[in-house]
Each structure stands twice: as structure tokens, then as C-alpha cells.
Image (tube, helix red, strand yellow):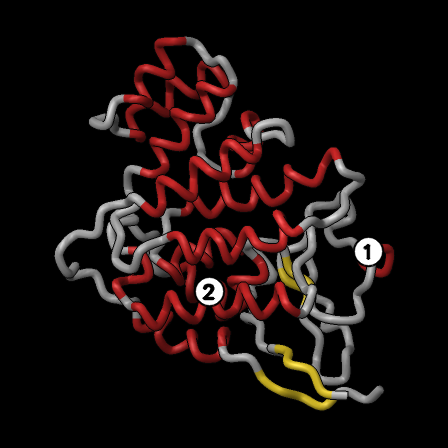
Amino acid sequence: MTRFINDSYLSRTQIHSVLSESAPDGTNAFYGDADLKRKFVERAVLHRSLDEIEHGIYWNPHDAQGNDLGFGWGYGEEGRFGDSHPDYSKHRGCAVGCLSHATENAHMVLSRMTGIPEPLCYLMDTLFESYHSSINGELTDWDKNLPRDVMDAIPVGADLSDVTRQMIARCLELADAPKNIIAAFSNPSTDLSELRELLYDEYGTHTYDTGFWGIFVSYENALDVRETLLTALRNAPVAAKSSVETPQLVSDLIDQIVTPVEVAVLA
């Protein structure tokens, strides 16, 4: 039989090279490149159609013969789920892993490859991992469509620099946080860096990563957070053409990590 797969994955050397790029400021989603957005939307659709989206792992690639290449690092105490993880007969990746094809540091890699702020990549992952928790861990269409829905919602060249603040404000409201903290994050002129101490005093964290978002996002409110995120992304302003260009390293890698390959698989 024949099926479409993408054998590519970023080597650790490539990942470290991508991470050597400065983190994007979020003012030019997809670096203003409509073709870049198209490729990431298509990648999400491809993995969805092949049922290759899975919880709890970044990206676990296989070669053309279906052999596990051994890069499926996940969150478990043992570092990876290995043979105990369900169905390792083909590629598997979580919301950020299936988009970045990075076997480690997938959130930061995805951010640099798309121009999307890191905190929003962490939020997408937190949503993806939170929603299934009360339904026996089973993947739903909601989970499987999330990577595509997020990529599709972001306008090319959008300024997403304020979306993180908007999402923090909404999460604080859902958590019934102290009113002074909600008020601080509800102010559009808020400088997030100046409020890190406020968050640390209340929640013990300085960073907007999965640990932070996980304080607020749960199965019960995931639908609300998801719709708030997609609406904020769709409504993000698109400024005049930005001088921020796609980093050359990302340009060099993008075809390799996005283009699906048709291969013959022995029945």
C-alpha cells in the first residue's frame, strides 16, 4: 500500500541552530509570508488525516520502513514512553511536535519557525494536553483539530504581541484571581515583564510556559480558553509590511520540515 508520510525531523544540531535565533517579538506572524502559513496549516491537516497526533510526546519520527528512530521524548518520569506508549507503528506528535517536527524544545522551535510568541505555543500545548484528561485520555476531534485551528486563525503578518496579555487576563478571570492582578493584566498598556514579580508572589512562577498555563487551564474551562484564544488570534491587527524577515536558517529548513513525501509501505 502507499501512504503519505513525512520522514523529516530536526536533528539536535538543527534544533540548537534554530534556538540560536532570537525569540520573535510576535509583531509579524509567519514573518509576513503567506506561503509559510500555508505550509504549517497543511502540515497540521496532513498529520490529522493520518491520525498521527498524540498526547504526551513531542515528535516521534519513523523511517520509510516504519522503524522507530528513537527520538520520541515525552514528559514521563522515564524521559520517553517507549514501547508502553500506544501505537508506535508510525509517526506521532503532540500539538507543537507535529508542527515543529522537533524532538526537544518543540515550543521554542515552533515559535522561531513561525514568528508566534513562545507563550502562545506553550498555551496551545497546555490546551491540547488538558482537554482529554477527564475523558479517559482519549483523543477527540477537538484535540486533533487544535493545531490546524490555531495555525489557520492567525492572519499572516499579524501583531500577536498583545495576545499573551489578553489570554493571561482571561485565565486569571476564570481562576477567580485577586482583583488587583486581573486589573493589571486587563490593562492594554501592561508591560508583561514588569508584572512577573506580581505573578511570582501569587503563583510562584516567572515564566509563561506550560507550568504557568497549567495553573489555570483545565478540562472544565478548556473550551472557553480555546475560543478566547482563537478569537484573539483572528482579531489581531495586521500592521503595515514589517521589516522583520524570516530568519535565513528557518528559510533553509522550512521545505525540509514541511513537504510531505509519498512512500511505498509494504503491506
Q: Residue at x 28, y 62 (%)?
A: 31
Query: Can you say whether 117 is above or below 67 in the image?
Result: above
Q: Residues within 10 Å of mark 2 (few under 14, many from 20)?
A: many
> Which residue appears at 40% of the width and 69% of the height?
38
Quarter-of-image position of residue 90: bottom right
**Which quarter of the figure is the C terminus placed in?**
bottom right
Q: Residues within 10 Å of mark 1 (few under 14, many from 20)?
A: few
Query: What kind of element bears circle 2?
Result: helix
- On the image, numbered disc 2 is attached to which residue? 41
Mark 1 or 2: the one toward you = 2
Q: Position of residue 26 (x, y in %)?
A: 30, 49
Question: Which residue is farthest left?
Answer: 240
**Relative to 244, is 175 above or below?**
above
Q: Position of residue 78 (x, y in %)?
A: 78, 48
Image quadrant occupied by the N terminus: bottom right
User: Mark 2 or mark 1, which is nearer the start of the sequence?
Assistant: 2
In percent of width and height, residue 81 lies at 78, 54
Q: Which label sits on residue 85?
A: 1
Type of amino acid at the residue the image marks with label 2 = Val
